[in-house]
Each structure stands twice: as structure tokens, then as C-alpha cells.
């Protein structure tokens, strides 16, 4: 059994760790508030844009839109969105596991022929891609630390340009969608080609709204589609950032509670050892007294 000094040192160490996890929880809560406000403000705008796009991109008219061209999948880009830092539970591992699952099940043959490329957003997935030595188009670690629509729009334009030039046939985004501080939903969305309304896979519903368009649909494509695709990628990054702070806040909250429980157990052990030490000292004194009287 450990002596009293070792237990005191252990208790002090756990208390120091508890102060750190508690401070990190408060920092994450403050960052979460800002990130949550940003994503909640963007969602109605992004959802409305996406809804309009789905309604003007019907299956019959998809040939008019180069970004909606469905062709045999020979080259794939997987965009992974995670965080720059750890200590956020299974947040980053969920994205990495989903990437591995896609490579093993859906794109196994393409992956063997090096036809699957990655885009890493966040240092954690960038480190993973470097360690695995997978083909990578680029690393964008600064997106999660200081997201801006202009910089993320540049990446969206590159992806659309590659699709139009037929350098890639499908683009998939893997990220965590923010629901609340304790819940993040792992998402795997098809970014390109754009799905027409009749094959919208996100909600499984067929949308048959009849609109009168002004100007014509061809001009609507030119104006609306680039904006929608840029906003969609920007929304995925903001969702991931909010999810990261929520996951870290929850993880630090649990770590603080666990430290509190550990301190209670150590204090109980300390008191037991101390009481045992006092009892032994009393026994030694009594035994010595009896020896002198004898």
C-alpha cells in the first residue's frame, strides 16, 4: 500500500489536472457559443439555396448542368473535415473510421489503383493521411482555426473545376454535423455530382414543386450553382467546428467529473492509511509501556 506522502502527491496531481480540464471546458463552452451562432445563422440560408437548386435540377434537365453529370465513377475525391487539436473524445476518430470504411467497402478497387484522392481539412486528418501515405490533393489545416468563406470558396471552385474537366467523377464530404453540445452526427454527403430532386438522397423524399423561373434556368444555373456549392462546403466546415467544440466541452466535463470521483477515492484511501498508521503507533506505545511494566 502507498504511503501517505505518495497519496498526497497523487491527490495534488489529480487536482491540478482537474483545474486544467475545468478551464478547457469553459474555453470550449465560449468557443462553442460563437461557433453555434455562426452555424445556426448559416443553416437557413444554405438549406434554402439547396432547396432551390434541387428544384431546378431535375433528372430530365441534368444534362444542362455540367456539375450534375452522372458518369461512371473512375476517380473519387474524399474531403475529410476534422479538427486541429485533440482532447475531444471520438470526434476525429469517427471521421477517420468512416474514411477507412469507404476505402474498404465502397471504393476498394479504385483505392487499389490509386484512383481515390483526399482533401484534408484539419491537422488530425492531415496527420492521418500523411501517415497512411494516401494520395492527397491538399491540406487545409487553417480552415478549422480561422474559417473564412473566401478561402473555403477557393477550394470549392477547385473541386468544381476538376469535376467539369472530368478529372474526377465523384466528390464526397465526410464531417460531423452539429446537433447540440453533446451530440454530433457523422455525415457522408455526395458533393458532386449534384443530385437532382428526384434522387435527393438526404431525406429520401421526391420533390415535385412546379416553379416559374425568372430569368431562365440556364442563367439560374450560372448564378446559383457556384454559390450553392461554395456555401455547402462552408457549412460543412462550420458544422465540424461547432461539433469539435461541443465534443471537447463534453469530454472535458466528463474528465472533470472523473477527477472529482478519483479525488474522493484517494481521500478515502488517504484516511484509511492515516488511520492505520495512527493505530499502529498506538499499538507500539501500548506494547512498549507493557514491556516496561513487566
Image (spheres, rainbow, N blue to C red):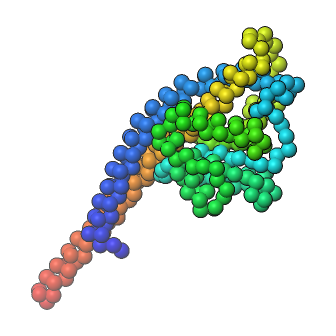
Residue occupying the point 15% across, 87% down: 291
Residue found at the very far left of the displayed protein: 293
Is residue 111 depicted above or below 188 in this figure? below
Q: Nearer the viewer, residue 283 or 214?
A: 214
- Let me know if residue 248 appears in the view: yes
> Which residue is most to the front?
165
Q: Position of residue 176 (x, y in %)?
A: 60, 41
Classify residue 64 as left or right of residue 260. right
Number of numbered discs on residues: 0
Residue drawn at the location 80% of the way across and 16% of the way down: 209
Q: Is residue 247 above or below residue 258?
A: above
Q: Could one spot residue 187 in this view of the protein?
A: no
* Residue 34 location, quadrant: top left
In this rendering, position of residue 227 left or right of residue 146? right
Q: Residue furthest bottom?
A: 294
Quarter occupied by residue 159: top right
Between 74 and 276, which is closer to the camera in this rendering? 74
Residue 202, quarter of picture: top right
Q: Position of residue 32 (x, y in %)?
A: 46, 36
Quadrant housing the N terminus? bottom left
Which x, y percent locates residue 83? 52, 47
Amino acid at each position: 500500500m502507498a504511503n501517505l506522502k505518495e497519496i498526497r502527491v497523487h491527490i495534488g496531481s489529480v487536482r491540478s489536472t482537474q483545474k486544467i480540464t475545468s478551464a478547457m471546458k469553459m474555453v470550449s463552452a465560449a468557443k462553442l457559443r460563437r461557433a453555434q451562432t455562426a452555424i445556426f445563422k448559416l443553416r437557413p440560408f444554405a438549406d434554402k439555396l439547396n432547396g432551390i437548386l434541387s428544384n431546378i435540377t431535375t433528372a430530365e434537365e441534368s444534362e444542362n448542368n455540367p456539375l450534375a453529370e452522372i458518369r461512371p465513377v473512375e476517380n473519387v475525391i474524399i474531403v475529410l473535415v476534422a479538427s486541429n487539436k485533440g482532447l475531444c473524445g471520438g470526434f476525429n476518430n469517427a471521421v477517420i473510421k468512416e474514411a477507412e470504411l469507404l476505402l474498404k467497402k465502397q471504393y476498394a478497387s479504385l483505392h487499389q489503383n490509386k484512383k481515390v484522392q483526399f482533401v484534408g481539412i484539419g491537422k488530425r486528418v492531415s496527420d492521418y493521411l500523411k501517415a497512411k501515405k494516401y494520395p492527397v490533393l491538399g491540406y487545409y489545416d487553417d480552415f478549422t482555426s480561422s474559417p473564412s468563406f473566401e478561402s473555403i470558396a477557393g477550394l470549392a471552385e477547385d473541386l468544381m473545376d476538376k469535376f467539369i474537366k472530368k478529372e474526377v467523377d465523384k466528390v464526397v464530404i465526410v464531417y460531423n454535423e452539429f446537433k447540440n453540445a453533446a451530440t454530433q452526427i457523422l455525415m457522408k454527403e455526395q458533393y458532386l455530382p449534384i443530385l437532382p430532386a428526384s434522387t435527393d438522397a438526404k431525406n429520401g423524399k421526391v420533390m415535385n414543386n412546379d416553379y416559374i423561373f425568372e430569368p431562365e434556368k440556364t442563367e439560374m444555373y450560372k448564378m446559383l450553382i457556384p454559390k450553392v456549392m461554395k456555401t455547402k462546403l462552408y457549412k460543412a466546415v462550420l458544422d465540424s467546428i461547432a461539433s469539435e467544440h461541443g465534443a471537447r466541452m463534453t469530454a472535458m466535463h466528463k474528465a472533470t467529473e472523473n477527477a472529482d470521483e478519483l479525488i474522493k477515492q484517494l481521500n478515502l484511501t488517504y484516511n484509511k492509511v492515516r488511520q492505520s498508521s495512527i493505530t499502529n503507533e498506538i499499538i507500539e506505545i501500548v506494547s512498549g509501556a507493557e514491556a516496561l511494566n513487566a
